[in-house]
């Protein structure tokens, strides 16, 4: 993960130096569908996603966008009359290559890229006899995602608005569990978000 961050930092430094335009702002929206598959637990994740965004314009309609997206993940279930609950903070760092069609006023765009993800959370259980509660912090497995998406961009002076849809396929399921021969569950590997970017052109 650190090696990828170093490579990304060097790459972005070069893009900033040679970029035709630079826009800073925020991007946010909501996940479409559930983030868990299987049975026995209920998702208590928040559907919203939000974070800062950097957009670098390159020649010939191309560009680079880098985001840092925050989500709050979690689930809750009952087994043997006891409770199990997990809460996690998730950060995704999409690095996207974008192409904007040279259309006046409204510019459709397509994007594709790579997204590393880190998650940290805690587990609370109350499934023992006699009942007891146990809380532990944990670093969930890191993930890598393939990202594709598209949308349109509006320009109002230096303000840039970019609503769109983004699909991410993750290489693993950091949240996963089972109880003996009982139900099992895991986080989904397919993620769809409806997002809106609000950015200000600074160069």
Image (spheres, rainbow, N blue to C red):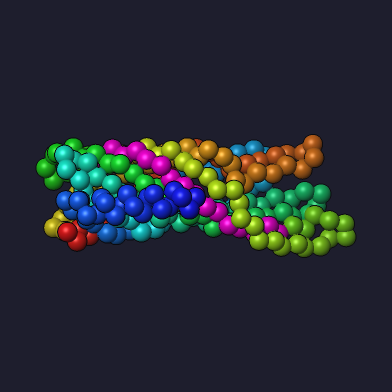
Q: Residue 77: horizontal and vertical position, in percent? A: 70, 50
Q: Is residue 117 magenta?
A: yes
Q: Is residue 177 above or below residue 49?
A: above
Q: Nearer the viewer, residue 124 or 47?
A: 124
Above or below, 98 relative to 88: above
Residue at position x 67%, y 46% in the image: 41
Q: Main secondary structure of the magenta part?
A: strand
Residue 96 among those drawn in magenta: no
Q: Residue 45, image x and y in percent?
A: 55, 53
Inspect this view and state whether residue 27 appears. Answer: no
Q: Residue 105 or 168: which is nearer the viewer?
A: 168
**In the depicted structure, whether residue 129 falls above or below residue 150:** below
Q: Which residues are magenta?
A: 109-124
Pick whichever, 78 or 121, lies toward us. 121
Left or right: 138 in relation to 149: right
Whole-percent x, y for residue 58 in the image: 20, 45
User: Dividing the image into 4 quarters, which one contains the C terminus?
Assistant: bottom left
At horizontal 26% and vertical 51% (from top left) the residue drawn is 14
């Amino acid at each position: 993960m650190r090696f990828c961050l170093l490579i990304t930092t060097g790459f972005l430094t070069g893009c900033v130096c040679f970029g035709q335009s630079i826009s800073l702002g925020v991007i946010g929206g909501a996940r479409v569908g559930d983030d868990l598959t299987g049975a026995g637990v209920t998702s208590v994740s928040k559907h919203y996603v939000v974070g800062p965004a950097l957009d670098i314009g390159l020649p010939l309609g191309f560009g680079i966008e880098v985001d840092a997206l925050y989500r709050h993940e979690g689930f809750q279930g009952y087994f043997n009359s006891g409770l199990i609950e997990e809460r996690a903070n998730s950060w995704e760092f999409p690095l996207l290559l974008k192409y904007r069609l040279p259309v006046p006023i409204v510019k459709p765009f397509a994007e594709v890229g790579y997204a590393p993800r880190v998650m940290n959370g805690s587990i609370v259980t109350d499934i023992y006899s006699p009942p007891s509660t146990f809380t532990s912090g944990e670093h969930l497995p890191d993930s890598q995602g393939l990202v594709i998406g598209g949308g349109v961009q509006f320009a109002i002076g230096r303000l840039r608005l970019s609503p769109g849809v983004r699909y991410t396929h993750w290489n693993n399921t950091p949240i996963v569990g089972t109880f003996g021969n009982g139900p099992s569950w895991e986080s989904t590997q397919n993620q769809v978000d409806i997002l809106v970017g609000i950015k200000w052109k600074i160069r």
